[in-house]
Each structure stands twice: as structure tokens, then as C-alpha cells.
């Protein structure tokens, strides 16, 4: 079968390898669609701090069940599925408390463990996430980033009736904005310097937008929320200046949620955090129930994915997909590899 291996930053080798077989409690998946995310791009550029080479990438995907190992029940051959990519120990403190998404020995497929960039892939059946048969292959591959947003928006607490600011309008920021709306936020404003990505946000119904190259966040929030202001901010951009703007503008007692991966440690005005009694929370990946929530929202149409679909490349052109992302810059949201 075909397999794509990133042997060093910017270098992908296509290999022919033996087909895997499912063991007890496992399922053999035929990979149909793979999404490329920002963390994958970090690996492509050699900037991911927790990934070594060679590595088989691919963690957001849609597949069909090809075969089942002994003892697997509740899923049928031919079913559409995706799967959670975490490999956890099950023994550390976070795992024992049910917070395995922050396992002390966490490995993520596509980064510290082999990913799905191959025709067939074996996973434990308990990692499978069933998808409606009506799902497109793209919708199935969008479940993983949507699950990030489902988890992050849940971490933010009760959002009913609250105004929310989201920093960054890439796939994660877009989905967080939509997830906050799904959880009852009164109004959501999204900020990004890319007019293209702001237009995508408008297409999914996030009509309050801010381009920080044209107006300050304070000006945008006054325009969007008036005197009400905002009580929740979610950082999906990883830009220290924007984070501090949000800290300065959020209502006292508000919640700031950090989802972004920062390449550099940002200076943060901690005096505001204490004096305004702000809550700063991190959000790390997701749990199984977040996948289920993402599937429900996508299936109902509450969370829209189609406007984010930018371009598709055949499996043999995996490297060209990265080059396209690099060339397009902020005029690109989600690129898929088709198997």
C-alpha cells in the first residue's frame, strides 16, 4: 500500500509498505480524506518542538471500516468513521481523573506516533467515532478541528447570553466562533488581519468582524457590542499583542481562553489578570465526547464546514499541498489530501 513519510522538514518520500492487519479489539480503516492543519505545517517547516523525523503525518481524517479484529462489536464494515489520534497511558493522574487529553505521556498520531497518511491504518476500536452515512468525506475530516472548538467552548463555561471575542479566523478560530454560537453566545466577534478569512467567517454567519490592521480591537468591540462589552475571549491566533488587547478590553471578571500554540512566549499583563479578577484557561485538544458534539453540530448544520474547504490534492501530490499552503498564505483555510 502507499505511504507518505516526511523524512525531514519539507521532504516527503512516497513508499510502498505491507498492508497492516487488525488485531483483537482493533479496526482496519481505509483512509479517504486527510486535512492539513497548522501544526502539520509547523512539522513541514521543522518548527514543531515535539516532532522528530521521519514521521507519518495525518491526524484529521475520514475513513471507512475495511475490516475488524476479533472481539470488535458495534461497528460494521463499510461504516464511515474518524478516530481520536491520542495515545495515552491510562495510568497518570490526569488519565485517572478522566482528563486523558492532558495525559502525562501523551502521544499524538502524526506527531509523536505514526499518523494516517497511508491507504490503510489500524486503530483501537474504542478510538473510533462513527459518522452519519450522509457525511461527505470532507465533513468527516473536519470533525477533528471542530472537536477542538467543541472542547474549547466548553472550557469557557456557560456562554448563554454572553458576548465573545475570538482572535484568529483560521479553521480553529472559525470553528470556535461557531461553537460559541452553538452554545448560546449572544454575539461573536472574530478578529484577523486577513480579509479573505474574515469573508469566510461572514459566510458561516459570524458577521461581526475586526481587521486589526484597520481598527483596534477596542473600536471593533464598541461597534459590535456597544456598552455591553464582552465577557469571554478565545485566543486562536497566538499573537501576544492581540492577547494583551483582549486582556485590556474584556469585562472585569471575564474569561480568557488560550487555544493557540505560541511559537514564542508572549509578555502578558498579569496585573490586569489579578486586578480585574480574570480567569485565564488553557484548552488542549479534546476528549471523545467533544468528537461526538462536533459530529452532532456538523450533521445538524449548526456548524458549517463547506466554506472553509479551500483546495484538494491527490495523495501523490502531498508535498504540493504544503507548497500551495505556503504560496497562498492567508488566502487559504483548509487543504485536503484525497486518497
Image (cartoon, helix red, strand yellow):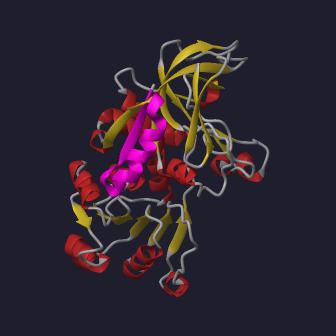
Residue 141: give x, y in percent of width and height: 44, 34
Instruction: State the residue at coordinates (29%, 37%).
Output: 301
**Where's the C terminus, which quadrant?**
top left
Q: Is residue 324 magenta?
A: yes
**Where's the N terminus, which quadrant?**
top right
Residue 176: give x, y in percent of width and height: 39, 54
- Would residue 5 be found to the left or right of residue 94 on screen? left
Magenta range is 316-338
In terms of image quadrants, where is residue 160?
Answer: bottom left
- Would residue 301 be found to the left or right of residue 57 on screen? left
Q: Is residue 280 above or below residue 95?
A: below
Q: Nearer the viewer, residue 279 or 238?
A: 238
Instruction: State the residue at coordinates (39%, 41%).
Output: 335
- Would residue 278 be found to the left or right of residue 54 on screen? left
Magenta span dominant secondary structure: helix
Instruction: State the residue at coordinates (31%, 34%).
Output: 300
Q: Nearer the viewer, residue 217 or 273?
A: 217
Residue 96: give x, y in percent of width and height: 74, 46
Can residue 287 be seen?
A: yes
Q: Is residue 188 magenta?
A: no
Residue 164: give x, y in percent of width and height: 35, 65
Q: Is residue 36 above or below residue 218?
A: above
Instruction: State the residue at coordinates (74%, 52%).
Output: 104
Amino acid at each position: 500500500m502507499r505511504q507518505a513519510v516526511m523524512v525531514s522538514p519539507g521532504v516527503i518520500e512516497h513508499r510502498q509498505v505491507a498492508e497492516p492487519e487488525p488485531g483483537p479489539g482493533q479496526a482496519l480503516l481505509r483512509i479517504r480524506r486527510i486535512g492539513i492543519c497548522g501544526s502539520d505545517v509547523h512539522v513541514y517547516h521543522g518548527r514543531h518542538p515535539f516532532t522528530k523525523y521521519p514521521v507519518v503525518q495525518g491526524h484529521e481524517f475520514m475513513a471507512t471500516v475495511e475490516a475488524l479484529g476479533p472481539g470488535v462489536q458495534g461497528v460494521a464494515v463499510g461504516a464511515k468513521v474518524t478516530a481520536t489520534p491520542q495515545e495515552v497511558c491510562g495510568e497518570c493522574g490526569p488519565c485517572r481523573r478522566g482528563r486523558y487529553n492532558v495525559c502525562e505521556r501523551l502521544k499524538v498520531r502524526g506527531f509523536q506516533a505514526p499518523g494516517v497518511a497511508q491507504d490503510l491504518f489500524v486503530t483501537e476500536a474504542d478510538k473510533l467515532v462513527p459518522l452519519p452515512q450522509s457525511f461527505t468525506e470532507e465533513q468527516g475530516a473536519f470533525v477533528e478541528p471542530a472537536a477542538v472548538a467543541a472542547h474549547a467552548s466548553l472550557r469557557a463555561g456557560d456562554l448563554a447570553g454572553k458576548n465573545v471575542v475570538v482572535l484568529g479566523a483560521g479553521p480553529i478560530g472559525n470553528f470556535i466562533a461557531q461553537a460559541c454560537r452553538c452554545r448560546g453566545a449572544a454575539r461573536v466577534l472574530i478578529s484577523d488581519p486577513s480579509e479573505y478569512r474574515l469573508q469566510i467567517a461572514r459566510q458561516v454567519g459570524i458577521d461581526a468582524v475586526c481587521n486589526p490592521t484597520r481598527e483596534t480591537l477596542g473600536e471593533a468591540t464598541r461597534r459590535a457590542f456597544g456598552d455591553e462589552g464582552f465577557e469571554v475571549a478565545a485566543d486562536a491566533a497566538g499573537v501576544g499583542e492581540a492577547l494583551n488587547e483582549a486582556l485590556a478590553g474584556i469585562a472585569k471578571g471575564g474569561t480568557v481562553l488560550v487555544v493557540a500554540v505560541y511559537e514564542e512566549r508572549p509578555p502578558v499583563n498579569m496585573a490586569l489578570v489579578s486586578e480585574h479578577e480574570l480567569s485565564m484557561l488553557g484548552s488542549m485538544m479534546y476528549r471523545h465526547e467533544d468528537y461526538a458534539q462536533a459530529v452532532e453540530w456538523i450533521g445538524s448544520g449548526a456548524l458549517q464546514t463547506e466554506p472553509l474547504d479551500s483546495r484538494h490534492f491527490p495523495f501523490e501530490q502531498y508535498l504540493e499541498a504544503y507548497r500551495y499552503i505556503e504560496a497562498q498564505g492567508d488566502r487559504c483555510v483548509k487543504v485536503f489530501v484525497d486518497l
